[in-house]
Image (spheres, rainbow, N blue to C red):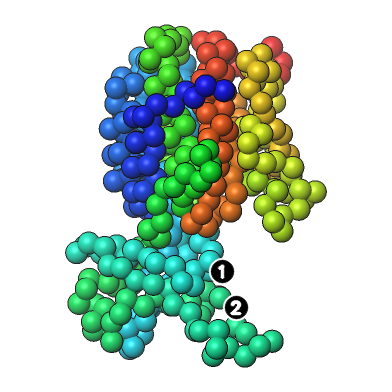
């Protein structure tokens, strides 16, 4: 497949991924996203918690949302010991198992303070009786001798902590970074807007390119912005597990892999006619795709949009990803481009005023 991304796209993706955007602190990342999106939309909507929406055809009554979430998992400072060691609590689904030996950035009013999650040397641990990393025993060391030194650097209970791991390309076509879940989604919906503009495509409805906050702690940003937009249709993009990852069971978690195309979900929140339209579009445009059964709920912003405003026809297109909620999340460039293409092609099939009613 010839690439639909360009040098500007790649530069934006790297800048956007490398910038920290922990849940509740997304606004600087949103500014980067809005700056990139500005040439491709007519206006912006923002809310008090940081969700950003680029709008094409804002005067139109019929509203279609394409959505991703911008926040990344992180930690909070929860306790500072007399010896200057910092204990943490989660902000989202941060994984205590990967913490030992990781560098961290502690965000303060005075700027970023570097630290490390320390761990006892192997020589000091008893074979067969080793402690595993737990939220109760992982601590951050900033090289301070005591609590007073820590506090003088501006660190206090409630400071947010992120990992500094930056964007890399592995083996030519695998994107690797922390926070691909789900700033890669924000990137993909921005690329849809770019392609619509550059191809001079006029939509018969308002398109709301929506980058929500606070998904990682319960879909909160989507819950808020859907009440503001009051959309008629919503297409959400997020990530899902590549179940070829070691120790995952495809019988339990689905049979999906990077490099095989976007993943289209089945779930009660997914409106069946809208999902069928996406599949029909994929087949008509020869875009490879996979399927995923999500049972009772998708666990994504799809659920928030679907059950809002008396019910909004909503669907989910996912990007398969390896090593979710680690600092080495991995996706395939071809999947990224195919998700962009699938959303781009699908929105062009939606008719102004279309209800996706089972009873029409």
Classify 226 as above or below 143.
above
In terms of image quadrants, where is residue 286? top right
Q: Write down the residue under mark 2.
A: 132
Q: Are marks 2 and 1 in contact (CB under 8 Å)?
A: yes
Quarter the N terminus occupies: top right
Residue under the point 56% across and 69% down: 97
Left or right of 353, for residue 12: left
Residue 235: percent from the left, percent from the top?
Answer: 55, 28
Residue under the point 43% across and 35% down: 187
Q: Looking at the image, which is closer to me, 221 or 111? A: 111
For the view shown, which residue lies furthest in the front direction? 171
Q: Looking at the image, which is closer to me, 203 or 20? A: 20
In terms of image quadrants, where is residue 360? top right
SS state under label 2 = loop
Total count of labels: 2
Query: Mark 2: few, some, or many residues within 10 Å (few <14, many ≥20)?
Result: few
Classify 338 as above or below 328.
above
Residue under the point 55% across and 88% down: 123
Query: Mark 1: few, some, or many residues within 10 Å (few <14, many ≥20)?
Result: few
Calculate the distance from the C-alpha at mark 2 to the C-alpha at mark 1: 8 Å
Residue 230: percent from the left, percent from the top?
Answer: 46, 28
Q: Write down the residue under mark 1.
A: 97
Left or right of 259, for residue 34: left
């Amino acid at each position: 497949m010839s690439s639909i991304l360009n040098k500007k796209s790649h530069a934006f993706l790297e800048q956007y991924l490398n910038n920290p955007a922990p849940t509740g602190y997304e606004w600087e990342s949103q500014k980067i996203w809005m700056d990139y999106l500005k040439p491709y939309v007519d206006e912006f909507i923002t809310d008090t918690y940081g969700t950003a929406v680029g709008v094409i055809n804002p005067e139109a009554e019929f509203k279609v949302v394409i959505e991703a979430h911008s926040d990344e998992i992180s930690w909070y400072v929860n306790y500072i010991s007399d010896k200057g060691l910092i204990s943490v609590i989660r902000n989202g689904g941060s994984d205590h198992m990967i913490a030992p030996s990781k560098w961290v950035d502690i965000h303060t009013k005075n700027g970023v303070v570097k630290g490390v999650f320390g761990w006892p040397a192997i020589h000091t641990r008893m074979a067969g009786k080793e402690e595993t990393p737990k939220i109760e025993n992982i601590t951050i060391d900033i090289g301070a001798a005591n609590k007073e030194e820590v506090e003088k650097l501006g660190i206090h209970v409630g400071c947010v902590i992120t990992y500094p791991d930056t964007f890399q390309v592995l083996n030519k076509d695998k994107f690797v970074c922390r926070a691909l879940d789900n700033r890669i989604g924000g990137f993909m919906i921005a690329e849809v807007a770019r392609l619509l503009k550059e191809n001079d495509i006029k939509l018969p409805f308002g398109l709301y390119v929506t980058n929500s906050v606070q998904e990682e702690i319960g879909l909160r940003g989507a819950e808020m912005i859907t009440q503001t937009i009051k959309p008629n249709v919503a297409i959400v993009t997020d990530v899902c597990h590549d179940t070829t990852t070691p120790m995952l069971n495809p019988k339990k978690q689905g049979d999906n892999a990077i490099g095989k195309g976007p993943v289209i979900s089945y779930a009660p929140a997914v409106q069946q006619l809208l999902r069928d339209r996406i599949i029909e579009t994929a087949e008509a445009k020869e875009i490879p795709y996979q399927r995923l059964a999500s049972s009772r709920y998708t666990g994504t912003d799809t659920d928030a949009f679907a059950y809002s405003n008396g019910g909004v026809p909503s669907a989910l297109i996912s990007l398969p990803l390896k090593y979710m909620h680690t600092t080495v999340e991995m996706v395939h460039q071809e999947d990224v481009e195919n998700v962009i293409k699938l959303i781009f092609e699908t929105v062009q099939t939606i008719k102004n005023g279309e209800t996706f009613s089972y009873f029409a």
